[in-house]
Amino acid sequence: MHLFLADYSVERVGPELEGFPYTFTRRFVGPDPAPEFVSFPVWLRESSVPAGDWMLQMDIEGGEYPVLLETPLEELAKFRIICIELHQITALWNEDFFQYVRLAIDRLCVHHRCVHLHANNAGSEKSHRGIQLPDLLEVTFLRKDRMPLQPALAPLPHPLDAPNLAHLPELKLAAPWA
């Protein structure tokens, strides 16, 4: 599998990718007009990604929401699997921020469905009105045409889940997540 990577915070890809085919762009992905940024649709075009069923892994430190809002739905639909680290989950109690995030996730859910959640223990947890929320949430989406009509529900945490940071305790998702 050929990998397409973008990250301005590193000068080059590390040795862990030695032997794998990849294309690296030293730019952040996001809507910022600064030269170290590239919009997601432009990055896709510039990368000359071949046609097919794509997979996206996005961890862009809060930039995921504007990227999801700016990317045309037909571009998002090209991805069979989308794994996103969602940031600022504990800020969802703010009505304006909640509506902003909801718009982004609703756009993603036009062609995809959430199939897995995992609290990232690199962030903190906060309680609001008796509900515990992690600040960081790892979410996996699957394109709807790749799903059974009646998906099975798996327990959370999933038996294959592991802490993002091994030296910290795992954060458990409780109601309303689990």
Image: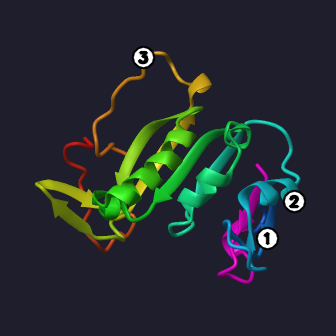
Query: In the rendered structure, which segment of residues is drawn in magenta?
Result: 1-17
Question: Mark 1 vs mark 2: which is more N-terminal?
Answer: 1
Q: Quadrant of residue 60?
A: bottom right
Mark 1 residue crowding within 10 angstroms, few (<14) / some (14–19) / many (20+): many
Q: Secondary structure at mark 1?
A: strand
- 176 in magenta: no
In the image, residue 107 lies at what x, y percent? Answer: 56, 41
Tell me the number on the disc at residue 139.
none
Colour theme: rainbow
Tell me the number on the disc at residue 150.
3
Q: Quick one: 46 or 93, which is closer to the camera?
A: 93
Amino acid at pointer 1:
Thr
Q: CA distance from mark 2 to mark 3?
A: 38 Å
In the image, residue 49 lies at what x, y percent? Answer: 84, 50
Q: Residue at x 52, y 70 (%)?
A: 61
Question: Mark 1 vs mark 3: which is more N-terminal?
Answer: 1
Quadrant where the C terminus is found in the figure = top left
Tag 2 residue: 46
Amino acid at pointer 2:
Glu
Q: Quick one: 176 or 12, which is closer to the camera?
A: 176
Q: Secondary structure at mark 2?
A: helix
Mark 3 residue crowding within 10 angstroms, few (<14) / some (14–19) / many (20+): few
Mark 2 residue crowding within 10 angstroms, few (<14) / some (14–19) / many (20+): few
